[in-house]
Image (cartoon, rainbow, N blue to C red):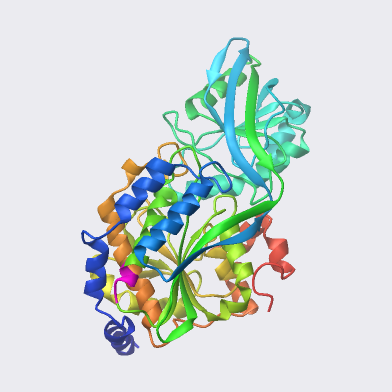
C-alpha cells in the first residue's frame, strides 16, 4: 500500500501538471502578480458589496475587467433567481427610560425594518432557547428581547452562534416578540453582520448590539430597572428578483468539454469592505486565471467563477448548479477558497476519502510549502455545498483561521488586515491545484450517486443533515428539488 501510494505521488508530480510547477509558483508569487492591486480596488474603492446593493454592480464590473486583464478566453455574467432583495440602510437604538443611554446597533442581514421607531420594554431571554422564552411567558409579547452570546474565540463558537439562530428566531415569533436584540460575540464595541435565514426575509426585526452595551442592558434588566428601548431599523427590502455570478473561462486544449471550476464569493457584508471575507480570494481567483493564461493551455477547461449571494445563503452557487445541471457530469472538480488569507495547509475533501490520495498527489509540488494535507471533513458553509449535493468532487482550501475569525463579517474586515505575501503564496497553491486537476490523465474521482451523497449528509462526524434541517434546506433535498435526484 505504502509503496503504491508513493509511486502514484511521483507519477502525479511528473505527469499531472503538464507544466513545470516551479514556473507556475514563480508566476503567482513574483512581481507580475496583480492580486494586491486588484484587492485594493475591490475593497478600498468599491467596498462592502451586498448582493443587489449599492456597490454590487461595480463589484461585478470589477470582476469582468479583472478577468479580461488576466487574459481569459471569455467572461460573462450569468443570472440566477433570488427569493428576496435586501440592503441595510441604517439602524439606531437607545434606552429611553429610566434614563437615556445611546446604544450601538446594526441590523442583522435579511431582517426587515421596524415600522419607524419601535419603543418597547426590554426583556432578557438569556441564550434564547425555547425554554428561555417559556420562562419569560407573556412578558416577551410586544417586547424587544435581548439574547446573550458567548465570546467568539473559535470556529466552533461561530458555528454554535449560527446553529442557534433559527431556534431563537422561531421562539421569538411564537412568543410574539416585537424584535430581537443579539449581544455581539466580539468585545471592544465591534459589530458584524450575520443572517439567520437562507434567502428569505426574516419574520421579525433583528439587530445586534455592541457587547459592552448589551451586557450593560442585561445588568439593568437584572437590577429591576425595567428599561424601555427605542429601536429604529431601516433596510431596503424587496421581493424576488435576479442576481448574477461572474463566469470566466480558459478553454482546454484536449478536453475542452471537461471542466475544473475555481470559485470564490464576490459578495460581502457591508460594515467593513470584505477584504478577508472574501475579497482576497476573489483577487486570488482572478490572479490564478492570469497565471494559467500566461502558461501552456491546460488540457481541460478551467472555469473561474465569482459567486454572489453567498452571504445571503449560498444563492449564487446554488443558482450556478441549477443552470449548469446538464453539464455537471463533466465538472471533474470544484475548488472553493473562502477562509481569508490564512496559510493553506491543503484541502478539505468534503466527505470523500476516495479522492484523498489523488488530491495529495496533485499537491505534491506544494507539499514543501506546507500545503500537502487533505482533511476529509465535509463543509456546509460555503459555495462547495451545492456541488457536494450534486456528487461533484469538491475541495475547499483548508487555511489557518487565526487571522480570519476576529474580523469575520465585522467593521474591521478591511484591506489593512490582508497579508499580500501570504495571499500570493495561496494563489500559487491554488494554481498548482487547478492545473493539476485540469491536466491529470484521470479525474480525481467519479460523480457520486444520491445514495453516496446521502451517506456523507448522514455522517455523524459532520452532521450535515441536521444542519440542513435547521436551515430549512432539507425538504428541498428530500424532495429531489435540490441536489442529485438519483
Ligand atoms: Zn465567506
* Residue 373 visible in rendering: yes
**Residue 437: x percent and y percent?**
40, 78
Front in this rendered view, residue 109 or 130:
109
Front in this rendered view, residue 301 or 217:
301
Q: Is residue 318 left or right of residue 280?
A: right
Q: Is residue 302 magenta?
A: no
Q: Is residue 128 left or right of residue 310?
A: right
Look at the picture and state if 402 lies above or below 229.
below
Q: Quadrant of the C terminus?
A: bottom right
Q: How many marks do you count on the picture?
A: 0
Q: Quadrant of the N terminus?
A: bottom left
- Residue lying farthest to the top in this orientation: 99
Magenta span: 291-295
**Residue at (68% x, 31% y) in the render:** 179
**Residue 166: x percent and y percent?**
66, 46
Look at the picture and state if 159 lies above or below 112.
below
**Residue 318: x percent and y percent?**
60, 63
Look at the picture and state if 24 lies above or below 151.
below
Q: Main secondary structure of the magenta part?
A: helix
**Residue at (76% x, 30% y) in the render:** 137
**Residue at (26% x, 85% y) in the render:** 14
**Residue at (54% x, 47% y) in the render:** 160
* Residue 372 visible in rendering: no
**Residue 128: x percent and y percent?**
64, 37
Front in this rendered view, residue 331 or 32:
32
Amino acid at each position: 500500500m505504502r509503496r503504491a501510494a508513493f509511486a502514484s505521488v511521483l507519477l502525479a508530480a511528473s505527469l499531472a501538471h503538464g507544466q513545470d510547477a516551479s514556473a507556475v509558483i514563480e508566476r503567482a508569487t513574483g512581481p507580475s502578480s496583480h492580486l494586491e492591486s486588484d484587492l485594493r480596488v475591490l475593497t478600498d474603492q468599491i467596498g462592502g458589496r451586498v448582493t443587489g446593493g449599492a456597490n454590487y454592480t461595480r463589484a461585478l464590473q470589477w470582476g469582468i475587467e479583472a478577468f479580461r486583464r488576466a487574459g481569459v478566453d471569455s467572461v460573462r455574467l450569468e443570472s440566477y433567481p433570488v427569493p428576496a432583495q435586501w440592503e441595510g440602510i441604517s439602524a439606531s437604538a437607545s434606552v429611553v427610560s429610566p434614563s437615556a443611554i445611546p446604544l450601538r446597533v446594526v441590523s442583522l442581514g435579511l431582517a426587515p425594518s421596524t415600522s419607524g421607531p419601535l419603543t418597547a420594554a426590554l426583556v432578557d431571554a438569556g441564550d434564547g432557547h425555547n425554554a428561555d422564552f417559556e420562562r419569560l411567558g407573556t412578558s416577551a409579547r410586544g417586547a424587544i428581547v435581548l439574547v446573550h452570546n458567548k465570546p467568539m474565540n473559535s470556529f466552533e463558537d461561530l458555528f454554535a452562534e449560527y446553529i442557534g439562530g433559527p431556534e431563537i428566531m422561531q421562539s421569538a415569533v411564537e412568543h410574539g416578540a416585537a424584535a430581537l436584540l443579539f449581544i455581539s460575540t466580539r468585545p471592544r464595541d465591534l459589530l458584524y453582520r450575520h443572517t439567520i435565514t437562507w434567502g428569505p426575509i426574516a419574520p421579525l426585526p433583528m439587530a445586534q448590539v455592541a457587547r459592552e452595551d448589551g451586557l450593560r442592558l442585561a445588568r439593568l434588566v437584572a437590577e429591576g430597572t425595567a428599561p424601555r428601548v427605542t429601536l429604529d431599523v431601516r433596510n431596503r427590502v424587496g421581493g424576488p428578483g435576479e442576481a448574477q455570478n461572474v463566469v470566466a473561462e480558459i478553454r482546454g486544449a484536449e478536453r475542452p468539454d471537461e471542466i475544473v471550476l475555481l470559485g470564490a464569493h464576490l459578495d460581502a457584508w457591508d460594515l467593513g469592505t470584505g477584504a478577508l471575507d472574501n475579497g482576497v480570494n476573489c483577487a486570488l481567483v482572478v490572479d490564478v486565471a492570469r497565471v494559467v493564461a500566461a502558461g501552456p493551455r491546460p488540457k481541460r477547461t478551467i472555469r473561474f467563477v465569482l459567486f454572489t449571494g453567498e452571504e445571503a445563503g449560498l444563492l449564487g452557487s446554488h443558482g450556478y448548479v441549477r443552470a449548469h445541471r446538464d453539464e455537471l457530469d463533466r465538472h471533474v472538480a470544484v475548488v472553493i477558497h473562502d477562509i481569508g488569507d490564512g496559510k493553506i495547509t491543503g484541502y478539505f475533501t468534503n466527505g470523500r476519502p476516495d479522492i484523498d490520495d489523488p488530491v495529495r498527489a496533485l499537491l505534491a509540488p506544494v507539499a514543501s510549502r506546507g500545503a500537502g494535507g487533505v482533511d476529509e471533513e465535509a463543509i456546509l458553509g460555503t459555495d462547495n455545498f451545492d456541488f457536494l449535493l450534486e456528487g461533484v468532487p469538491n475541495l475547499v482550501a483548508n487555511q489557518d483561521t487565526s487571522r480570519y475569525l476576529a474580523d469575520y463579517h465585522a467593521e474591521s474586515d478591511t484591506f489593512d488586515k490582508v497579508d499580500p505575501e501570504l495571499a500570493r503564496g495561496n494563489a500559487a497553491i491554488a494554481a498548482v491545484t487547478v492545473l493539476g486537476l485540469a491536466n491529470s490523465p484521470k479525474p480525481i474521482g467519479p460523480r457520486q450517486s444520491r445514495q453516496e451523497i446521502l451517506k456523507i449528509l448522514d455522517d455523524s462526524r459532520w452532521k450535515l443533515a441536521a444542519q440542513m434541517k435547521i436551515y430549512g434546506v432539507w425538504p428541498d433535498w428530500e424532495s429531489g428539488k435540490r441536489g442529485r435526484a438519483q
